Image (tube, rainbow, N blue to C red):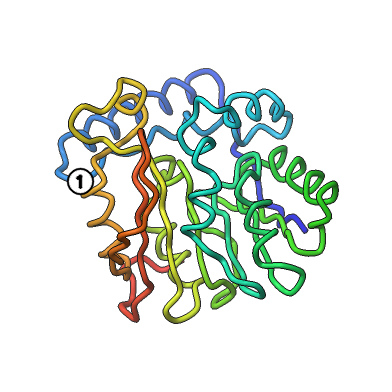
Amino acid sequence: MIHRSKYPTVFGGAAACLLVLTTVATAQEASKSPGPKQYPAEMNQKFVDPNADVERFVKQFENQGRDVYAKREAIARAVGPRPGEAVADIGAGTGLFTQLFAQRVGSKGRVYAVDIGPAFLKYIAEQAKKQGHERIVETVLNTQDSTKLPAGSIDAAFLCDTYHHFEHPQAMLASIHRALRPGGRLIIVDFDLRKGASQFVKHRARAPKEAYFREIAAAGFKLVERQDAPVLKDNFYAEFRRTEHKPSVQP
């Protein structure tokens, strides 16, 4: 089931110029702040396009040269969703982990494929049907402010190379906090802007992971030490637990 939302309006003429100037100004201000820089909103437009060529993204995302694809089984094992659990794959993209999680939660579980791109959700639904997961996988069209998931509906939230795309991190974290059940887990895999990071990572990460962790802690999550976390080349793997701390931004 896909939850509908309005697509962004495309402006022209003077309005477009104003939008560009505003975006540049916002980015400049963000670059001066001690926290992570703001992700440029226009960078996400290619995903929102209802006519996006998903097969092209499959070739781009699902190849052995991509860190998280090569280590997909190790990541899925580390996340470790159990039979009957409800997991949200937020920023599901081509649904790679959606289908891997569906195998693990089984017929009594639920995997929510959450994404801002209707074309990607359509593709995920088609793949779920082909793999016999159509009764397990539910697609959810979200926004940059909300997961659109009901309160207390999931045991775990998973984000793979998605966190750095958030245009409004605190609002999204508040929405995830609300959707998680007490003690629920938030697992994040994202580009690791560490010393010696590749140019590929430097062009994509909006901050070192420590800055992300501060954002996440402020939203009501506690970092969990995992000695068995997958070792990744370009990415980090981090797990958090939902606490009863009330986020400052409500979904």
* Percent of width and height locating residue 133: 79, 57
Label 1 sits on residue: 35
Q: Disc count in the image?
A: 1
Q: Would you call the spot at circle 1 few (<14 residues within 10 Å), some (14-19), or many (20 or more)?
A: some
At x 56%, y 71%, the residue is 154
- Left or right: residue 211 versus residue 76 is left
> Of the residues shown, which amino acid type is indicated by label 1?
Gly
At x 27%, y 56%, the residue is 215
In terms of depth relative to the viewer, which is nearer, 41 or 178? 178
Q: What secondary structure is found at the residue carrying circle 1?
A: loop
The image shows residue 55, relative to residue 228, as above or below, that is above
In terms of depth relative to the viewer, which is nearer, 69 or 148? 69
Q: Quadrant of the N terminus?
A: bottom right
* Percent of width and height locating residue 97: 60, 49
* Percent of width and height locating residue 181: 50, 78
Q: Can residue 10 be seen in this view?
A: no
At x 32%, y 65%, the residue is 219
* Percent of width and height locating residue 213: 26, 55
In terms of depth relative to the viewer, which is nearer, 115 or 129? 129
At x 61%, y 73%, the residue is 85
Query: Which image quarter: residue 151?
Result: bottom right
The image shows residue 21, relative to residue 82, as above or below, that is above
In terms of depth relative to the viewer, which is nearer, 185 or 174? 185
Q: Can residue 106 be seen in this view?
A: yes
